[in-house]
Image: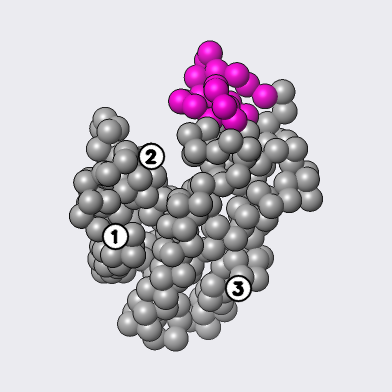
Amino acid sequence: MLVGANFASAGVGILNDTGIQFANIIHISKQLRYFEQYQRRLAALIGPEAASRVVRGALVLITLGGNDFVNNYYLVPYSARSREFSLPDYVTYLLSEYAQVLDRLYDLGARRVLVQGVGPIGCVPAELALHSLDGTCDAELQRAAEMYNPRLMALLEELNARHGGGDPVFVGVNMQRIHNDFIDDPKAYGFQTATDACCGQGRFNGMGLCTMVSSLCADRDTYVFWDAFHPTERANRLIVQQFMSGSTDYITPMNLSTVLAVDLQKQQLRT
Protein backbone atom coordinates (compact mmCIF):
# COMPACT_ATOMS: atom_id res chain seq x y z
CA MET A 1 0.00 0.00 0.00
CA LEU A 2 3.00 2.32 0.40
CA VAL A 3 3.92 2.29 -3.28
CA GLY A 4 0.53 2.27 -5.00
CA ALA A 5 -2.93 0.83 -5.41
CA ASN A 6 -5.20 -0.05 -8.32
CA PHE A 7 -8.98 0.08 -8.17
CA ALA A 8 -9.67 -0.14 -11.91
CA SER A 9 -12.22 -2.50 -13.42
CA ALA A 10 -12.60 -3.37 -17.10
CA GLY A 11 -15.82 -2.36 -18.82
CA VAL A 12 -16.90 0.45 -16.50
CA GLY A 13 -17.73 3.99 -17.47
CA ILE A 14 -18.61 7.36 -16.07
CA LEU A 15 -22.22 6.20 -15.79
CA ASN A 16 -23.28 3.31 -13.58
CA ASP A 17 -25.45 1.83 -16.34
CA THR A 18 -22.41 1.48 -18.62
CA GLY A 19 -21.20 -2.12 -18.87
CA ILE A 20 -24.39 -3.66 -17.50
CA GLN A 21 -23.82 -6.61 -19.86
CA PHE A 22 -20.71 -7.55 -17.86
CA ALA A 23 -20.88 -9.44 -14.56
CA ASN A 24 -19.22 -8.26 -11.36
CA ILE A 25 -17.65 -5.05 -12.62
CA ILE A 26 -16.68 -2.39 -10.08
CA HIS A 27 -18.41 0.87 -10.98
CA ILE A 28 -16.51 4.13 -10.52
CA SER A 29 -18.61 5.10 -7.48
CA LYS A 30 -17.48 1.90 -5.74
CA GLN A 31 -13.88 2.43 -6.85
CA LEU A 32 -13.95 5.81 -5.12
CA ARG A 33 -15.22 4.12 -1.95
CA TYR A 34 -12.30 1.67 -2.22
CA PHE A 35 -9.94 4.66 -2.51
CA GLU A 36 -11.39 5.97 0.77
CA GLN A 37 -10.98 2.55 2.37
CA TYR A 38 -7.38 2.38 1.14
CA GLN A 39 -6.62 5.69 2.85
CA ARG A 40 -8.06 4.49 6.15
CA ARG A 41 -5.96 1.32 5.99
CA LEU A 42 -2.89 3.33 5.00
CA ALA A 43 -3.44 5.70 7.94
CA ALA A 44 -3.68 2.72 10.29
CA LEU A 45 -0.34 1.50 8.93
CA ILE A 46 1.73 4.71 8.91
CA GLY A 47 -0.41 7.34 10.66
CA PRO A 48 -2.88 9.92 9.30
CA GLU A 49 -0.34 12.66 8.47
CA ALA A 50 2.00 10.34 6.58
CA ALA A 51 -0.96 8.76 4.77
CA SER A 52 -2.15 12.20 3.67
CA ARG A 53 1.33 13.00 2.32
CA VAL A 54 1.40 9.72 0.35
CA VAL A 55 -1.97 10.43 -1.28
CA ARG A 56 -1.24 14.09 -2.01
CA GLY A 57 2.13 13.16 -3.49
CA ALA A 58 0.74 10.37 -5.64
CA LEU A 59 0.02 10.37 -9.35
CA VAL A 60 -3.56 9.25 -10.00
CA LEU A 61 -4.36 7.81 -13.43
CA ILE A 62 -8.02 7.68 -14.51
CA THR A 63 -9.37 6.40 -17.80
CA LEU A 64 -13.12 6.74 -18.33
CA GLY A 65 -15.46 7.66 -21.17
CA GLY A 66 -14.84 5.25 -24.03
CA ASN A 67 -17.10 2.55 -22.61
CA ASP A 68 -19.89 5.09 -22.16
CA PHE A 69 -20.03 5.25 -25.95
CA VAL A 70 -19.06 1.72 -27.05
CA ASN A 71 -20.78 -0.19 -24.23
CA ASN A 72 -23.72 2.11 -23.66
CA TYR A 73 -24.83 4.75 -26.17
CA TYR A 74 -23.82 2.70 -29.24
CA LEU A 75 -24.04 -0.76 -27.66
CA VAL A 76 -27.18 -1.66 -29.62
CA PRO A 77 -29.21 0.26 -32.21
CA TYR A 78 -31.72 2.56 -30.49
CA SER A 79 -30.17 2.00 -27.06
CA ALA A 80 -31.93 3.51 -24.05
CA ARG A 81 -29.38 6.31 -23.77
CA SER A 82 -29.49 7.11 -27.50
CA ARG A 83 -33.28 7.41 -27.28
CA GLU A 84 -32.94 9.62 -24.20
CA PHE A 85 -30.21 11.95 -25.51
CA SER A 86 -28.96 13.35 -28.79
CA LEU A 87 -25.19 12.85 -29.05
CA PRO A 88 -24.31 16.47 -28.06
CA ASP A 89 -26.65 16.28 -25.07
CA TYR A 90 -25.21 12.90 -24.07
CA VAL A 91 -21.68 14.36 -24.13
CA THR A 92 -22.90 17.22 -21.92
CA TYR A 93 -24.47 14.74 -19.51
CA LEU A 94 -21.34 12.55 -19.41
CA LEU A 95 -19.09 15.49 -18.63
CA SER A 96 -21.39 16.79 -15.90
CA GLU A 97 -21.20 13.36 -14.25
CA TYR A 98 -17.43 13.12 -14.82
CA ALA A 99 -16.93 16.51 -13.15
CA GLN A 100 -18.48 15.05 -9.99
CA VAL A 101 -16.09 12.07 -10.12
CA LEU A 102 -13.06 14.33 -10.51
CA ASP A 103 -14.27 16.69 -7.79
CA ARG A 104 -14.63 13.68 -5.50
CA LEU A 105 -11.07 12.57 -6.28
CA TYR A 106 -9.89 16.05 -5.30
CA ASP A 107 -11.91 15.94 -2.09
CA LEU A 108 -10.25 12.60 -1.27
CA GLY A 109 -6.82 14.20 -1.50
CA ALA A 110 -5.69 13.61 -5.09
CA ARG A 111 -3.51 16.50 -6.26
CA ARG A 112 -1.99 15.12 -9.48
CA VAL A 113 -4.57 13.43 -11.70
CA LEU A 114 -3.75 12.24 -15.21
CA VAL A 115 -7.05 12.16 -17.14
CA GLN A 116 -7.04 10.24 -20.40
CA GLY A 117 -9.45 11.30 -23.12
CA VAL A 118 -11.30 8.89 -25.38
CA GLY A 119 -9.17 7.26 -28.07
CA PRO A 120 -10.21 6.63 -31.68
CA ILE A 121 -12.99 4.24 -30.67
CA GLY A 122 -14.20 3.91 -34.25
CA CYS A 123 -10.84 2.45 -35.31
CA VAL A 124 -10.46 -0.46 -32.87
CA PRO A 125 -10.62 -3.95 -34.45
CA ALA A 126 -13.93 -4.75 -32.72
CA GLU A 127 -15.65 -1.83 -34.44
CA LEU A 128 -13.92 -2.46 -37.77
CA ALA A 129 -15.19 -6.05 -37.66
CA LEU A 130 -18.75 -4.80 -37.25
CA HIS A 131 -18.81 -1.68 -39.40
CA SER A 132 -15.91 -1.54 -41.86
CA LEU A 133 -15.42 -3.22 -45.21
CA ASP A 134 -11.88 -1.99 -45.89
CA GLY A 135 -10.40 -0.99 -42.53
CA THR A 136 -11.80 2.54 -42.59
CA CYS A 137 -12.74 3.80 -39.11
CA ASP A 138 -16.42 4.04 -38.17
CA ALA A 139 -17.40 7.66 -38.77
CA GLU A 140 -20.14 7.88 -36.13
CA LEU A 141 -17.98 6.59 -33.29
CA GLN A 142 -15.18 8.89 -34.39
CA ARG A 143 -17.62 11.80 -34.36
CA ALA A 144 -18.48 10.97 -30.75
CA ALA A 145 -14.81 10.97 -29.68
CA GLU A 146 -14.11 14.18 -31.58
CA MET A 147 -17.07 15.87 -29.90
CA TYR A 148 -16.21 14.61 -26.41
CA ASN A 149 -12.44 15.17 -26.17
CA PRO A 150 -12.20 18.96 -26.63
CA ARG A 151 -14.99 19.45 -24.13
CA LEU A 152 -13.23 17.18 -21.64
CA MET A 153 -10.09 19.32 -21.93
CA ALA A 154 -12.19 22.45 -21.38
CA LEU A 155 -13.71 20.82 -18.27
CA LEU A 156 -10.23 20.08 -16.90
CA GLU A 157 -9.27 23.73 -17.39
CA GLU A 158 -12.36 24.76 -15.40
CA LEU A 159 -11.55 22.31 -12.61
CA ASN A 160 -7.94 23.49 -12.48
CA ALA A 161 -9.10 27.10 -12.23
CA ARG A 162 -11.31 26.10 -9.31
CA HIS A 163 -8.88 23.80 -7.48
CA GLY A 164 -5.38 24.39 -8.77
CA GLY A 165 -4.55 27.89 -7.64
CA GLY A 166 -2.00 28.18 -10.46
CA ASP A 167 -0.74 24.62 -9.90
CA PRO A 168 -2.78 22.30 -12.13
CA VAL A 169 -4.31 19.26 -10.43
CA PHE A 170 -5.71 17.71 -13.60
CA VAL A 171 -3.51 16.88 -16.59
CA GLY A 172 -5.35 15.95 -19.79
CA VAL A 173 -4.08 13.38 -22.29
CA ASN A 174 -5.20 13.55 -25.92
CA MET A 175 -5.42 9.79 -26.47
CA GLN A 176 -7.06 10.24 -29.85
CA ARG A 177 -4.10 12.24 -31.17
CA ILE A 178 -1.58 9.73 -29.78
CA HIS A 179 -3.39 6.74 -31.30
CA ASN A 180 -3.99 8.52 -34.59
CA ASP A 181 -0.23 8.74 -35.10
CA PHE A 182 -0.09 4.93 -35.13
CA ILE A 183 -3.28 4.47 -37.12
CA ASP A 184 -2.46 7.03 -39.82
CA ASP A 185 1.09 5.76 -40.40
CA PRO A 186 1.79 2.53 -38.49
CA LYS A 187 4.99 1.73 -40.38
CA ALA A 188 6.56 5.01 -39.22
CA TYR A 189 6.39 3.57 -35.69
CA GLY A 190 7.56 0.08 -36.60
CA PHE A 191 4.12 -1.53 -36.83
CA GLN A 192 2.85 -3.62 -39.71
CA THR A 193 -0.86 -3.13 -39.04
CA ALA A 194 -3.15 -0.81 -37.12
CA THR A 195 -6.38 -2.54 -38.18
CA ASP A 196 -5.97 -6.20 -37.21
CA ALA A 197 -5.71 -7.42 -33.62
CA CYS A 198 -2.91 -9.78 -32.68
CA CYS A 199 -5.26 -12.09 -30.76
CA GLY A 200 -8.85 -12.75 -31.74
CA GLN A 201 -10.95 -14.25 -34.50
CA GLY A 202 -13.07 -13.23 -37.45
CA ARG A 203 -12.72 -10.08 -39.52
CA PHE A 204 -9.70 -7.99 -38.50
CA ASN A 205 -9.27 -10.58 -35.73
CA GLY A 206 -11.71 -8.31 -33.91
CA MET A 207 -14.55 -10.63 -33.01
CA GLY A 208 -15.00 -11.82 -29.44
CA LEU A 209 -12.38 -12.18 -26.72
CA CYS A 210 -8.76 -13.29 -26.86
CA THR A 211 -8.83 -16.91 -25.66
CA MET A 212 -6.75 -20.09 -25.86
CA VAL A 213 -8.45 -20.98 -29.15
CA SER A 214 -8.04 -17.56 -30.81
CA SER A 215 -5.89 -16.84 -33.82
CA LEU A 216 -2.60 -15.47 -32.48
CA CYS A 217 -0.15 -13.36 -34.49
CA ALA A 218 3.50 -14.38 -34.81
CA ASP A 219 4.94 -11.10 -33.53
CA ARG A 220 2.77 -8.91 -31.31
CA ASP A 221 5.33 -6.07 -31.46
CA THR A 222 4.30 -5.40 -35.06
CA TYR A 223 0.64 -4.85 -34.10
CA VAL A 224 -0.89 -1.69 -32.67
CA PHE A 225 -3.76 -3.69 -31.12
CA TRP A 226 -3.36 -6.74 -28.91
CA ASP A 227 -7.05 -7.70 -28.87
CA ALA A 228 -10.32 -6.28 -30.15
CA PHE A 229 -10.01 -3.08 -28.08
CA HIS A 230 -6.63 -2.73 -26.35
CA PRO A 231 -3.15 -1.73 -27.56
CA THR A 232 -0.19 -4.06 -27.39
CA GLU A 233 2.51 -3.56 -24.77
CA ARG A 234 4.78 -1.96 -27.37
CA ALA A 235 2.07 0.50 -28.38
CA ASN A 236 1.44 1.28 -24.71
CA ARG A 237 5.14 2.01 -24.18
CA LEU A 238 5.03 4.54 -27.03
CA ILE A 239 1.88 6.06 -25.52
CA VAL A 240 3.64 6.46 -22.16
CA GLN A 241 6.56 8.17 -23.92
CA GLN A 242 4.09 10.88 -24.93
CA PHE A 243 2.83 11.04 -21.33
CA MET A 244 6.40 11.68 -20.21
CA SER A 245 7.73 14.04 -22.85
CA GLY A 246 4.95 14.91 -25.31
CA SER A 247 4.11 18.43 -26.40
CA THR A 248 0.89 20.17 -25.37
CA ASP A 249 -0.69 18.73 -28.52
CA TYR A 250 -0.62 15.41 -26.68
CA ILE A 251 -0.72 16.26 -22.97
CA THR A 252 -1.77 19.51 -21.34
CA PRO A 253 -1.05 21.80 -19.53
CA MET A 254 2.31 19.99 -19.11
CA ASN A 255 3.81 16.55 -19.57
CA LEU A 256 4.73 14.23 -16.73
CA SER A 257 8.45 15.01 -16.88
CA THR A 258 7.57 18.64 -16.20
CA VAL A 259 5.12 17.65 -13.45
CA LEU A 260 7.81 15.57 -11.73
CA ALA A 261 10.36 18.40 -12.01
CA VAL A 262 7.89 20.92 -10.56
CA ASP A 263 6.99 18.59 -7.68
CA LEU A 264 10.66 17.88 -6.94
CA GLN A 265 11.39 21.61 -6.84
CA LYS A 266 8.50 22.18 -4.43
CA GLN A 267 9.75 19.36 -2.21
CA GLN A 268 13.26 20.86 -2.15
CA LEU A 269 11.89 24.27 -1.24
CA ARG A 270 9.96 22.77 1.68
CA THR A 271 13.11 21.09 3.02
Residue under circle 2?
10
Give the mark toward the camera: 2 or 1: 1
Question: What secondary structure is found at the residue carrying circle 1?
Answer: loop
Question: Nearer the N terminus, badge 1 or badge 3?
Answer: 1
Image quadrant where residue 200 sits? top right
Q: How far across and how far down the image is residue 115, in percent?
A: 44, 62
Q: Residue at x 60, y 19 (%)?
A: 215
Q: How far across and how far down the image is residue 65, in percent?
A: 38, 54
Image quadrant where residue 85 sits? bottom left
Amino acid type, residue under disc 2 in the picture: Ala
Q: Is residue 266 above or below residue 121?
A: below
Q: How far across and how far down the image is residue 144, in percent?
A: 43, 57
Magenta stretch secondary structure, dominant: loop
Q: Is residue 183 left or right of residue 55?
A: right
- As for residue 216 lying within the magenta part, the answer is yes
- Distance from disc 2 to disc 3, alpha carbons, whole Å, reads 28 Å
